[in-house]
Amino acid sequence: MRKLLLSALALVALGSGAMAQQKIDNSSEARHRAIKDKTNPFNRKPLGKGGEMVSDWYDVMDIISKSNVGANLQGYVDFLTDDSLNKFVEDDGTIRYGGTTSVGQILDPADDLIELTDKPQNKLTRFVSYKVDSILFRYLYVRNVDSIDDGMGGKAAVVDTVYIHYWKGNQLRRSQFTDGTRYAMPVNGWNRNRRMPANFFAEEKYLLSSGANGVFDTTRANNNNGGFENAWTSKYTSFPAPAGMQIDANPNGSTADLLTGFSWTFKSGVPAVIGTDTAVMVYQQDPSTLPAGTRRNNYFGYGLFLNEGTTGWENTKSYNTAIMALKASSYAVVNGWDGFIAGQAFNNERFVETYFHLSVIGNIGASVSDVENVEMSGLFPNPARNTTNVRFTLKNSSDAVVTVHNILGQEVESHNLGKVASGKYDYSLNLSNLKPGMYTVSVKAGNSVQTEKLMVTE
């Protein structure tokens, strides 16, 4: 039983104080096939650690793929449910109910596995301060219902909600299993009334109504154009992180709280149960067999990887941890887990496809003169179709120019902003003249230049 935790006495020594928790056997849980997704476009130049204001994406699954379980990872999609009674009808007619309430990821930018990726210089140390610029994850949002009866003879529009919660530093605790493999968790667990995280650095809400919402696209299930809900395509979405998502390292390197993390939770605007009528979320059989009048629900999924090998997770030097709240653990303590469960605690060790965009904010001891004058904090949205906002900060007043280059390095657009005072800016960049593809967007202020990659979609 490789996923038992250390004894309570040993946990106190680690400063966690958590009760002994056991592994979760959910190996019999249904697996949902994911159609091959497009290649993730979010690759950036390496992070610098000499006080330079440069930034990069951390691809968690790329890091995990370099671990001892990397060769055994298989990709799927899974679904979030805000009610234990949301019904799933599988392709063989089996009826079951949704199992996952909330998912997320804790990032350890000092993970030794980063050294095995193609960006080994991205591994940070306890001497390096950084901030979280944005996060990104793979998702699918299937909208079956746009309106419901309002109880007065009319219709009410359905608005679904995605909640994003963020943690940083000492809001995350470290612990380990008896075999020495490590994991991290939010400190203060779970709010059973809301069935969401209890304490966090920030909470953001994204309302999903009918039509384009600018963040999440409705992704229809499709299997060979037959409409069967037994294989899914998915997309990527990114969010700017809330202000203050910054990790400040101590000059003597003694800071232990260098972790950061986020989670997302889906709440449907469609009641799962009305009287004795239970809504069907996922129907994996031939749609022509769906009984007339069957009430449907909207659903939200995410990119999931399972370790399908016989060897278990063995990383004993980092705290990169997927976190998952099952419907059971969101109502009560399960095997010692209250709310979120470490992904490595499952028999079929679970990992979530997530990405963090970090910016180094200077080595300890770096003087003001060492820091570049311009700092880009991202392009939002990205990928984008018609426009994107170029977000940047000037330390000092300077002439500023925004330029766009194609993948061959040729300049395709240039926008002279003139003399710009110090401060934070959002510059709306029109993309209507650009063909779909990969570009770079640069902001130059004096002799200082920052660059981000941009994916323009059809």
Image (spheres, helix red, strand yellow):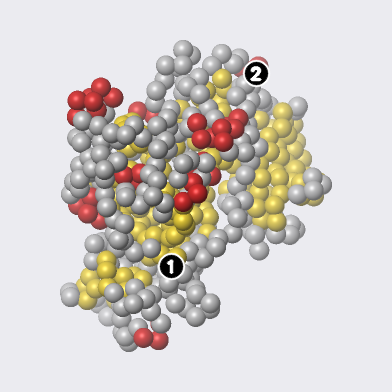
Q: Which residue is denoted by mark 2 in the rendering?
A: 370
Q: Secondary structure at mark 1?
A: strand
Q: Is residue 209 visible?
A: no
Which picture quadrant has residue 93? bottom left
Residue at image point 43% right, 60% down: 77
Which quarter shows the N terminus? top left
**Foreground residue among 357 and 69:** 69
Amino acid found under the numbered disc labelled 2: Asp
**Foreground residue among 411 and 346:** 346
Q: Is residue 21 above or below residue 155?
A: above
Whole-angstrom CA distance, mark 2 to mark 1, is: 48 Å
Q: Position of residue 125 (x, y in %)?
A: 51, 24
Q: Which label's residue is closer to the chain start, 2 or 1?
A: 1
Q: Is residue 55 above or below residue 70?
A: above
Q: Which residue is denoted by mark 1 in the rendering?
A: 142
Image position of 356 (left or right of 275): right
Q: Secondary structure at mark 2?
A: helix
Image position of 408 (left or right of 229): right
Amino acid found under the numbered disc labelled 1: Val
Image position of 238 (left or right of 349): right
Which picture quadrant has residue 28? bottom left
Q: Position of residue 340 (x, y in %)?
A: 29, 45
Q: Position of residue 333 (x, y in %)?
A: 18, 46
Residue at image point 75% right, 49% down: 407
The dot on residue 127 is: none
